[in-house]
Amino acid sequence: MSATFIVIPARAAPVRMLGARAWIRTHLFPDWKNGVATVLIAALVAWYLPQLLDWALFNAVFSNDNAACRAVAHDAARPGACWGVITEKYRVILFGRFPHADHWRPLLASLLLVLMLVASCRPRCWRRWLAPAWIAAFAAFFLLMRGGVAGLTYVETARWGGLPLTLLLATLGIAAAFPIAVLAALGRLSPLPAVRAACIGYIELVRGVPLISVLFMASFMFPLFLPPGMTPDVLLRVLAGITLFAAAYLAEVVRGGLQAIPVGQIEAAKSLGLGYWQTQRRIALPQALRHVVPAIMNSFISTFKDTSLVTVVSLYELTGALGLALRGDTDWRPFYFEAYLFIAVIYWTGCYAMSSYSHWVERRLAVSNQTAGNAQ
Amino acid sequence: MTTGPAIPPRKPPPSAGRRWRWRSQATRGLLWQAALVLVLALIAWYLTRNTLENMRARGIQSGFDFLLQPAGFSIGESIIEFDSADPYWKAFLVGLGNTLRASVAGIVLCTVIGTLIGIGQLSRNLLLRKLCKAYVELFRNVPVLLQLLVWYLLLTDWLPDTTAALQPVLFPDSGIYLSKNGLSYPLPVWEAGHLLTLIGCFAGLVLAWRYRRRAARDFEQSGRARALSWPMLGLVAASSLAGWMLGGMPSGLDIPQTGEMNLSGGGSLTPEFLAITLGLSIYTASFVAEAVRAGIQAVPHGQLEASRALGLSRGQTLRLVLLPQALRVTIPPLTNQYLNLTKNSSLAVAIGYPDLVSVANTTLNQSGRAVECIVVIMVIYLMLSLATAWLMNWYDSRAAIRER
């Protein structure tokens, strides 16, 4: 048996994995199906993007010139957006029925809350003074908005509106919900059956019904609950409703954090002789809350979006103030869409910033958990 | 030699019989609970007393007897017949039906859109990935109420009148019209022959089910997998078709006609229904997409590598390996989103879709029975939430890994 020497053909050179062509191939044309999808999407974008830009920028009217707005809106061949409606109405949309001359007050109050929010997002500010600082900020907010002191004219809460109201409902709602949520979460994990039942009842009842029914309750039923002759402000009632609602969702978030703590931590605390409240306050809650910061942030985003519902019980926050600005004005009423886009951008910016922040915290936590795990 | 302070002799440990001392944990626990129950009872008593007193002072009647009185308002759309002489309880029933209709349509739509977008977010195609990501970020971060208002505005303001209704580009004369008055579409006219079609369809379903059982048994015995979806679909379709032909091929269609003022005939969906269904499903789909993406990413990478090593195509890998395992991770967040969608359908009140909350709101303003109306809303939503949660838990237990 003689072995013949057969030359096998040389292998093809490996596909080049670097450079622009390779990048385009792996990311845009990995196979024929993806290639078709890429071409389709690119064609759609190329077709619609210029039209969209033309409508939103190049052919749009930015000045509050009603006639020009109407002309450009009815131009069938080349329609344009009427951003003039915002130039005309932005103060009513942002500040509601607040007295026009005093608009610096809601502006300052909103800035204050936004600044506090930004500060609270920085881990170096997670100190003991944060809670008193928030209380001070809310006090300053109420002073600025309400007036009646230091030469500021008194403005009743019924005239508050727009952005400051949205911010107030979201921040104060969550801030007030927080202690209730922590108590409810602890109660739900408590070994005492009556406490547990009460907390489960509250949490599940509230989570099972829509916010709008809670707001209806705040609006129609709370006045009945109080002693005769006492009718609290509608803002307070709605705030109470939002707080009770947010607390139930937040309680589940906190419970998740508490349940993620290793049992050893609690046992160690007990063996050191710490009592129940000491254990919760010094051992369990600090770790639990640190772990659920992203989830708390998501709750806050939900509450921020949910504030738009209070317009149903006639409080004029951003969405309500928009209706207030346009509903009665026949000149500008056709441009509702542009105005909706304007407040959508405000909501979107706030929510997107907060969710990006929550992703950042999540990554940071993951890293610190990893290093802690390696150190052990 | 100095002696230190005398150490008192240790107390004997408490025996089991003496646990009920003042400082023992059991006693304190009992006291805490008694205090809590007492406080809750006091609060409840106080609130009830105030409510009763306020109601008496304002002359508000209470009780659920008003449910039997005639409603006196009409409802724009309903599944069952309703006119203003019907009692309130029937109005609530109509509202509940509308809520369910919008919720079920929304849940189906948001699952389909959300799954596609969620898979798209993990595509190899950069453009598709970014587009899906943009969809999620765009719709997740804007309040759903605002989105509903925008959809309603687009559907009622930007669409043409019925005389110039839009028709599908590819099928211009199919009888489908989209206009300010909503969507109109042809409906088959009921004839006796359709009964045989239904019977055929049912027979097809039975056949398909039996085919599936047999395929499963074959797979257990021989390990040879049979194609499932196409044969099953084919069986149902063929059987229905046979029934239809046996029934004499009834083909009468009630096609909407364009009249002077509006469209008549055929089936139709109101702009309110379209707005609430579209708005809710597009909003919720962004959350569903995130849940699906997280579920797929939670499947260990080895599973993907193993299925590639077995020679499964990308589509097969997705369908047979990734999605079934992702489903287990996805079901709990998906349940939450379905519940959220159902609860958010209460926002219909803002755009005038006569759902449960909207009907209750009208009833409340008309009869002044605030407490009763809110109790009705809350009880019904609680029951809906519990039912959805129960259904999804049942599905979850079915999708869970069966351990042998």
Image (cartoon, rainbow, N blue to C red):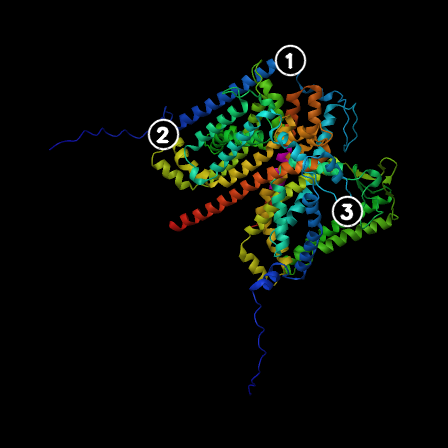
The residue that label 1 is drawn on is B58
The residue that label 3 is drawn on is B202
> At numbered mark 1, what does the secondary structure look like: helix, strand or loop?
helix
Pinpoint residue A356: horizontal percent, then vertical percent: 54, 44
The magenta segment is B382-394
Pinpoint residue B83: horizontal percent, then vertical percent: 79, 26
> At numbered mark 2, what does the secondary structure look like: helix, strand or loop?
helix
Dot placed on the residue nearer the N-terminal end, 1 or 2: 2
Type of amino acid under label 3: Phe
The residue drawn where x is 78% and y is 43% is A76
Label 1 – label 2 distance at C-alpha: 59 Å
The chain holding disc 2 is: B
Dot placed on the residue nearer the N-terminal end, 2 or 3: 2
Label 1 – label 3 distance at C-alpha: 59 Å
Is A224 drawn above or below residue A118 in the view shown? above
Q: Are marks 2 and 3 on the same chain?
A: yes
Type of amino acid under label 1: Arg
Dot placed on the residue nearer the N-terminal end, 1 or 3: 1
The residue that label 2 is drawn on is B16
Q: Is A105 on the left-hand or right-hand side of B108? A: left
Residue extending furthest toward the top: B57
